[in-house]
C-alpha cells in the first residue's frame, strides 16, 4: 500500500503542476494519421498512463522527451490499429483475459492497483485495455503474415538453450522464431509509417 501511496503522490503532484495536463479535458486535434484523429486529450491520457506503468515522475527536464515519445507511440499504435482492422483480426475472450493478465504480471503491477491510481487521477483505464488489445492483435497479425517466411537453424536454438538452460527445445524454437517475426514486424511498421499520411496540426 505504501508503494501505491508514493506512486500516487508523485504522479498527482506532477499532474497538478505540469502544463501538459492543463487541457486534460479538451480535445484539440494534434495529429492526423491516415485521417485517424489524435487529440491533445489522447496524448495526455496515454502519457499519464505511461507514467504510472513505468513509475516515472514528470519533470521540466523530461517532459518534452516523454511527450514526444508518447506521440511516437500513438502514431505507431494507430497505424497498427488501421491494419488489424483492415485484416479483421479478432481475439477470443480467453486470449483477451490471458494477455491482459500477462501485461500486468510482466510489469510487476497489480491490475487493481493500476485501476485505483487511474481513478484517483481521473484517467480512462479503458485506454490501456485498448492499447493492450491492439498490441496483441498486431502480434497475431504479424505472426500470420511472416511465420512462413522465418527460417531458424539448430545452432540458433542451441545457442539460446545454452544461455538459458531452463528453456525446453520447443520453447527455445518458439522464442527464436518470435524474434525473427518481431524483426519483420518492425520493418513492416516502418514501411507503413513511411507510406502514411501524418499531418501535424
Image (spheres, helix red, strand yellow):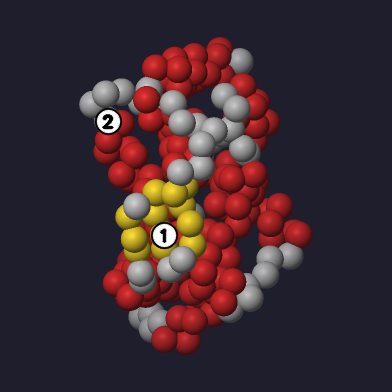
Q: Which residue is mark 2?
A: 62
The structure residue drawn at horizontal position 48% and vertical position 57%, both measured from the top left corner, is 37
Can residue 72 be spotted in the picture? no
- Bin the neighbour count of mark 1 within 10 Å (Cα to Cα): few under 14, some 14-19, many 20 and up: some
Report x, y in % for residue 193.
34, 69
Query: 24 or 104, which lies in front?
Result: 24
Position of 109 compared to 48: left or right?
right
Residue 45: where, in percent of width, then height?
A: 50, 38
Residue 20 is left or right of residue 130, and the answer is left
Image quarter of the N terminus: top right
Q: Callout 2: few (<14), some (14-19), or many (20+) C-alpha neighbours within 10 Å?
A: few
- CB within 8 Å, label 2 to label 1: no
Q: Tell me what residue is drawn at x 34 percent, y 52 percent.
A: 201
Pair 2/1: label in front: 1
Furthest residue in direction right, as rendered: 93
State the image quarter where residue 127 is shown.
top right
- SS category of the residue bearing label 1: strand
Image x and y of residue 166, in percent: 48, 55
Q: Height in image: 30 above or below 197? A: above
Q: Is residue 28 above or below residue 52?
A: below
Residue 85 in the image, given as x and y percentages of width and height: 59, 71
Residue annotated with mark 1: 32
Residue lying furthest bottom:
148
Answer above or below: position of 124 versus 2.
below
Disc count in the image?
2
Q: Residue furthest left?
A: 61
Task: Give the distance between the C-alpha atoms of the residues marked 2 and 1, in whole angstroms.
Answer: 25 Å
SS category of the residue bearing label 2? loop
Residue 193 shown left or right of residue 55 in the figure: left
Q: Residue at x 60, y 57 (%)?
A: 133
Q: Residue at x 53, y 59 (%)?
A: 135
Closer to us: 133 or 63: 63
Amino acid at each position: 500500500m505504501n508503494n501505491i501511496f508514493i506512486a500516487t503522490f508523485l504522479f498527482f503532484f506532477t499532474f497538478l503542476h505540469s502544463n501538459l495536463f492543463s487541457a486534460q479535458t479538451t480535445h484539440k486535434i494534434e495529429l492526423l494519421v491516415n485521417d485517424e484523429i489524435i487529440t491533445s486529450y489522447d496524448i495526455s491520457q496515454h502519457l499519464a498512463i505511461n507514467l504510472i506503468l513505468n513509475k516515472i515522475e514528470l519533470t521540466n527536464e523530461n517532459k518534452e522527451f516523454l511527450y514526444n515519445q508518447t506521440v511516437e507511440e500513438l502514431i505507431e499504435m494507430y497505424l497498427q490499429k488501421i491494419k488489424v482492422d483492415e485484416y479483421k483480426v479478432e481475439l477470443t475472450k480467453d486470449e483477451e483475459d490471458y494477455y491482459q493478465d500477462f501485461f500486468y504480471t510482466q510489469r510487476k503491477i497489480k491490475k487493481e492497483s493500476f485501476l485505483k491510481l487511474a481513478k484517483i487521477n481521473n484517467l480512462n483505464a479503458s485506454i490501456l485495455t485498448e492499447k493492450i488489445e491492439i498490441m496483441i492483435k498486431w502480434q497475431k497479425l504479424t505472426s500470420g503474415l511472416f511465420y512462413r517466411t522465418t527460417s531458424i537453424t539448430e545452432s540458433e536454438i542451441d545457442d539460446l538453450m545454452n544461455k538459458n538452460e531452463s528453456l525446453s527445445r520447443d520453447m527455445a524454437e518458439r522464442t527464436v522464431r518470435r524474434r525473427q517475426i518481431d524483426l519483420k514486424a518492425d520493418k513492416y511498421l516502418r514501411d507503413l509509417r513511411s507510406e502514411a499520411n501524418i499531418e501535424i496540426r
